[in-house]
Each structure stands twice: as structure tokens, then as C-alpha cells.
Image (cartoon, rainbow, N blue to C red):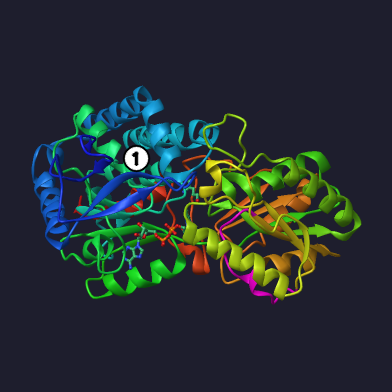
Amino acid sequence: MQRSSRQVKLIENYIDGKFVGGKREFADVNPADGSVIAQVTEADREQVDAAVQAARRAIRGEWGQLGVRERAARLERIAHVIESRFDCLVSAEVADTGKPVSLASRLDVPRAAANFRAFADLIKSTGLESFQTEGPDGKRALNYAVRKPLGVVGIITPWNLPLLLLTWKVAPALACGNTVVVKPSEETPATATLLAEMMQQAGIPDGVYNVVHGFGPDSAGEFLTRHPDVNAVTLTGESQTGAAIMKTVAASVKPVSFELGGKNVAIVFADCDFDETVKGIAEAIFTNTGQVCLCAERVYVERAIFDRFVTALKKKAEGLIVGSPLETNTDLGPLISAQHREKVLSYYRLAREEGASLVTGGGVPEFGNSLDRGFYIQPTIYTGLKESARCVKEEIFGPVCHVAPFDSEEEAVNLANDTKYGLAASIWTTNLKRGHRVAQQMNVGITWVNCWFLRDLRTPFGGVGLSGIGREGGLHSLNFYSELNNICIRL
Ligand code: NAD
Ligand code: 6OD
């Protein structure tokens, strides 16, 4: 519940079907103007334990007895409740993240409902493999597998697409019959908490969905991942957070799924559909103020069109409206926090030190009103950096890219793959043979050709290298969120 009898709202933990306060609180800040939206209760070790124990009990209760059809029906009900409270979720997401209301309405909230529907459909329709086996004695046996829940799943999520990324994990976890304890980002606690109310409305039994608020190390995140009764951990976040959690869970050998950072590439060939490509690349760089793990921060353009392309991209960037997330024509809201803006600005300074030429942006916009208290930043384009520059190698996670020319397909592939990350790539060409050929050489989990962030929830999603471990999406999610028990019967 979000109590509002005090000066600001209180966002509480949700444990065993009840909203519970605690000893310590922290502020939830609106990035659009720096105002405090709410105080948030930080879960201590005992509360995280209470959430995990509630989740354990819930598996043994009504939830654990439900058949697949009824579980799927409950997921569909959650999707329905999300849609019925669409505006409330949009407002909460916009206030927490500063993302434009148009983006939250188009992407975040519809995807939350779609996540539940997709996994409700999938769990109903997915079969499992079976084999007729001939033993050494010539006698036959039948092998078949059954899917069982893992148990209690710890779900840790970031601030950039809070509800979308939370439901992306909660939906398949519940579809497989697990119970969950979720730890949303400390920057964006609101929609995970609203979802708790929606779980109640949808008839999800107490203890199946629990929310603990707080930070990572020595706080709710670490207490959850370290808990011996948590059977699996799934994280979306920074690569170094994945490394820290991996250490924490190593002793108990818990399964992990990690969706981590990226330094994504876009490759533009001279034969691309020029206008469509400029539009598509601008989206790939600037959507959500560059705070999407899939955003392109490295753009390689075939030399024949390099100057024309940079000029067109500059024009596009300069036409973007940076402003209040509440205005329907705003393209870019603020960054998530003052601290994150300082990090992105430090890269803007570093780019200059590393010898970049600034094409556009590079600073902070001035509004002359209350928005100056928000964490806004200019969309920024650089050229001229060496490939070894830190700005070309490190994830910045802001509305910024570096554009560089290439002379051959082979060179473009080598440049694209010269990174420790490996999340997403996009390739822009009207030569589809080339599109397939180059796509298949990308060392990433997801490659788009002539599009970006076009999602089908049944497809594998994840990264290689520093970008993650494992794949979620469709059957891959079902396989992560369940244990397969193979049964062999002598016939
Ligand atoms: P973050 O790693 O700082 O935080 C993510 C979550 O992990 C938060 O809830 C945080 O409290 C928690 N956490 C941090 N340290 C922890 C620890 N030691 N133990 C347990 N929990 C801990 O990430 P962020 O800043 O919130 O999000 C931005 C990052 O997420 C970027 O690197 C971005 O690329 C990545 N991301 C990846 C994907 C993907 O699908 N691959 C999607 C979105 C964001
Ligand atoms: O679309 C998705 O399923 C997904 N996981 C998107 C991740 C976006 C990263 O910020």
C-alpha cells in the first residue's frame, strides 16, 4: 500500500499479503524536478527472511495445488487488472523514472500486461519432449520429462524499465508455479508495489508475490540473494552487479539468470534506406534518454555516406524535445538521478579529453523554470575517437553515441565485435543477403536488421560476455524458471 496520510506517501514492503513498514526509510525522488515523491521502507534482514518464508509457505498452500490451466487463468487476470489500472501505473512509472508519458503509455505498461498474457498462453500450450528408448537388452522404455517449479525465486530489477522488466521475470516465474520475492531498484519502487495491490485484486494467494525494498550490498538485495531458502536468482542490472551476485550465490550453487549491460553497435551500410535508417538509429540511441540496455552507443557508417549520415543524425538529435515527461510531445525526459547524470557528464568530459569532435550536445539544457532542478542532459553525438577510447569501450547509459566510418564489411564486423559486451546489434542495409551474413557474425544475443527493439516475447533474449548469462523469453524462460524431472519407464 502507498499510505498518504503523512506529508509524502509511504511505500512499504509487501510480505505475505500485507503491507509492512520498518525501521529505516529512504526517499523516492522524481528525476523531472528533484522533488521527493515518497518515503520508502527499507527491508531489513528479518523482513527479507519473512518474505522468503512466506513465499515458501505459499508453495505448499493453494498456489502449489493449482493446475496449469488455473495458473494461466490467474495470470490473465493480472494482465486484465494491469490494463484496468493503466493510468495509475503510467503516472507512477513517469514520476519514478522521469520517462515521457508517451513512452510509458506505449511501451512500459502495455508490455507489463503482455508479459503476463504471453506466459499464460505459453504454459498452456507447451509440451515436453519424450523418447522411446531401446535398451542394450533390446527391451523398450519410455522417457518423458515433467516440469516442476524451482521454489522461491529472488528477482532483482533495475530502474530503467521498472515494471516491464519486473513483469518480464515475475510472469514466467509464476507461470511455472514458483513464488517470488522481488527487490525493485531503490530508484523506482512504486510500480512493483502497485503490482502487489493488483495481485490481490487478481486473486493471487498471499505469499506468492512479495516485495522487499532497499539497496544492493548489505541491504535487501544482498539479504535476498544470500538467503539459503531462495532457490534461484534472476537479475537485470549492471555487469558488476552480476559479478557480485554470482559471488554471493556461489556457495549454495543457485541457478542464476543475468541480463546485464551492453555497449551495443549499429552498422549502417551505404545501401540502407537512408531516411528510415536515420530515424531508426536515432530511436536506438535516444529512446528513454539512452537508458535502455539495448541502446546503440557505437554507430559505424560506411564511408561513402558517413558525412551525410552524421549531418542527418545531428539534425534529428537537435529536433528532439527535451523536457517535462508530462508533456505529450516530449521526446526525452531526464536521466534517472543526479548521480547518474554526473556519471554521464563525466563521459562527456572524458570524450573531449580523449580527442572526440563534438557533433551536437555535450552539456545540460537550461529551462529557466522548475525543470532546472531535474536531471536533464543534452542528446549528444561524437565522432573522431580512437577505437581504444574508454568512451568507445565502456557502457555510458545516456543519450550519447560515437559515430565512426568503415570501409569494408569485414572491417565493420571486426569493429562491432571488438567489445567485452555482447547484448544487441542492429544492421541497416537493403541487401538482405548481406543483412543475414553480417547478422550471423555478430557476437551478441540479439541482432536486428532494419529495426531495433522490435520484440516477440517467444524469442530468446540475453547476452554474451559481460552482457549476461542465460536466455529468457518464451521456452527459455520456462526452462529457467522450472526444473525438469525426466522419468524413464520400462515398457
Ligand atoms: P544496478 O546493477 O545498479 O542495479 C540493479 C538492481 O540490483 C537494483 O535493484 C540494485 O539495488 C540491485 N543490486 C545492486 N547491487 C547488488 C548486490 N550486490 N546484491 C544484490 N542486489 C544488488 O543496475 P541499474 O543501475 O539499476 O540499471 C542499469 C544497468 O542495468 C545498466 O548496466 C543496463 O545496461 C542494465 N540493464 C540490462 C538489461 C538487459 O536486459 N540486459 C536491461 C535493463 C538494464
Ligand atoms: O524486451 C525485453 O524483454 C527486455 N528484457 C528488454 C530489456 C531492455 C533493457 O533495458
Task: Give the residue pinned by disc 1.
Answer: 191
Q: Report the magenta stretch's main SS.
A: loop
Q: Does 351 sit left or right of 24 as displayed? A: right
Residue 459 appears at what percent x and percent y? 50, 45
* Residue nearest the observer in this picture, 423 or 137: 423
Tell me the crowding category of disc 1: few under 14, some 14 to 19, or many 20 or more residues within 10 angstroms, Cα based.
many
Say whether residue 392 is magenta. yes
At horizontal 58% and vertical 56% (from top left) the residue drawn is 398
Quarter of the image holding residue 95? top left
* Residue nearest the observer in this picture, 132 or 408: 408
Instruction: Judge whether 301 appears above or below 54 on screen.
Output: below
* Residue nearest the observer in this picture, 180 or 361: 361
Quadrant placement of the N terminus? top left
Q: Is residue 206 visible?
A: yes
Q: Does 334 sit left or right of 95 as displayed? A: right
Say whether residue 90 is magenta. no
Instruction: Judge whether 116 appears above or below 291 on screen.
Output: above
Q: Is residue 418 visible?
A: no
Residue 196 appears at what percent x and percent y? 24, 38
The span shown in magenta is 386-399
Q: Does 166 sit left or right of 394 as displayed? A: left
At horizontal 34% and vertical 54% (from top left) the residue drawn is 186
* Residue nearest the observer in this picture, 446 or 260: 260
Q: Secondary structure at mark 1?
A: helix
Q: Residue furthest front?
A: 368
At horizontal 19% and vertical 53% (from top left) the residue drawn is 151
Amino acid type for the residue under numbered disc 1: Thr
Residue 279 appears at what percent x and percent y? 73, 41
Q: Give the total number of marks visible in the rendering.
A: 1
The answer to whether mark 1 is within 8 Å of ligand 1 is: no
Quarter of the image holding residue 170? top left
Residue 453 appears at what percent x and percent y? 58, 44
